[in-house]
């Protein structure tokens, strides 16, 4: 593993000197991580989250998952005893309705929370990751609007097929 500063220097140099090769390497890395994540068993897939998020060029997203100036963070499934710390972070950094939604997630699907811990083991952040199939019946319907995505996509597809058939 490269030190962050070395990785950033090499990445910046390659992006500036050979943008085509830089893009080719990024796409190859993405395909590799994606293939590995699909081959991993369900319990290990969450480990690929950081590998998939790291190449994202959105500065806010990168800072949220890879904060500058903070080192030695590790991620593991949140423990029940960490509820207060996680919800305090949510209330401090999220809009009130979002914090209420995160609280609802914790009450209904606590195993979907992952805590980011600092070197002393204290919660420094968290994220939520869950397989949508496991959420049915566990969350209030209003909290899961995306569960209807497949039905909506099927209706759109059927409409397009009907239009093409005319």
Image: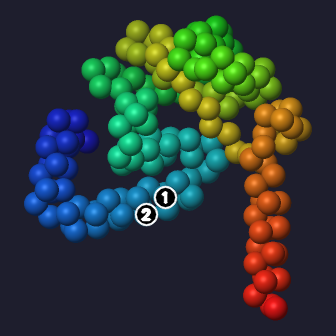
- Left or right relative to 103: residue 155: right
Q: Nearer the viewer, residue 73 or 59?
A: 59
Q: Which residue shows up at 47% across the image and 10% down it?
A: 122
Give the residue at x 58% y 20%: 94
Q: Position of residue 35 (x, y in %)?
A: 49, 62
- 8 displayed left or right of 107: left
Secondary structure at badge 2 equals: helix
Label drawn at residue 34: 1
In this view of the protein, which residue sits in the foreground, 136 or 63? 63
Q: Residue furthest bottom?
A: 166
Tell me what residue is drawn at x 49 percent, y 46 percent.
Answer: 48
Asked if the residue under mark 2 is in contact with the one under mark 1, i.e. CB atoms within 8 Å, the reply is yes
Alpha carbon separation for disc pair 1 and 2: 5 Å
Percent coordinates x, y for residue 155 in the rendering: 82, 67
Answer left or right for 163 relative to 79: right
Task: From the top left corner, tell me how far across and down residue 24 is, in percent.
Answer: 29, 67
Label 1 environment density (alpha carbons within 10 Å; few <14, some 14–19, many ≥20): some
Q: Is residue 69 above or below residue 140?
A: above
Residue 117 shown left or right of residue 150 in the figure: left
Quadrant of res 112:
top right
Q: Which residue is mark 2?
A: 31
Q: Does residue 84 appear anywhere in the picture?
A: yes
Please state which of residues 94 and 136 is positioned toward the viewer in this rendering.
94
């Amino acid at each position: 593993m490269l030190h962050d500063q070395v990785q950033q220097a090499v990445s910046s140099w390659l992006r500036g000197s050979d943008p085509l090769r830089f893009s080719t390497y990024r796409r190859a890395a993405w395909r590799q991580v994606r293939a590995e994540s699909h081959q991993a068993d369900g319990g290990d897939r969450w480990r690929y989250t950081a590998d998939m998020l790291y190449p994202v060029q959105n500065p806010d997203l990168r800072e949220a998952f890879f904060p500058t100036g903070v080192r030695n963070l590790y991620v593991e499934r949140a423990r029940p005893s960490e509820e207060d710390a996680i919800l305090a972070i949510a209330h401090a950094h999220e809009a009130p309705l979002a914090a209420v939604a995160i609280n609802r997630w914790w009450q209904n699907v606590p195993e979907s929370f992952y805590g980011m811990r600092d070197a002393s083991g204290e919660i420094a952040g968290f994220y939520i990751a869950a397989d949508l199939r496991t959420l049915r019946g566990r969350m209030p319907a209003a909290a899961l609007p995306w569960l209807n995505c497949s039905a909506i996509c099927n209706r759109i597809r059927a409409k397009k097929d009907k239009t093409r058939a005319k």
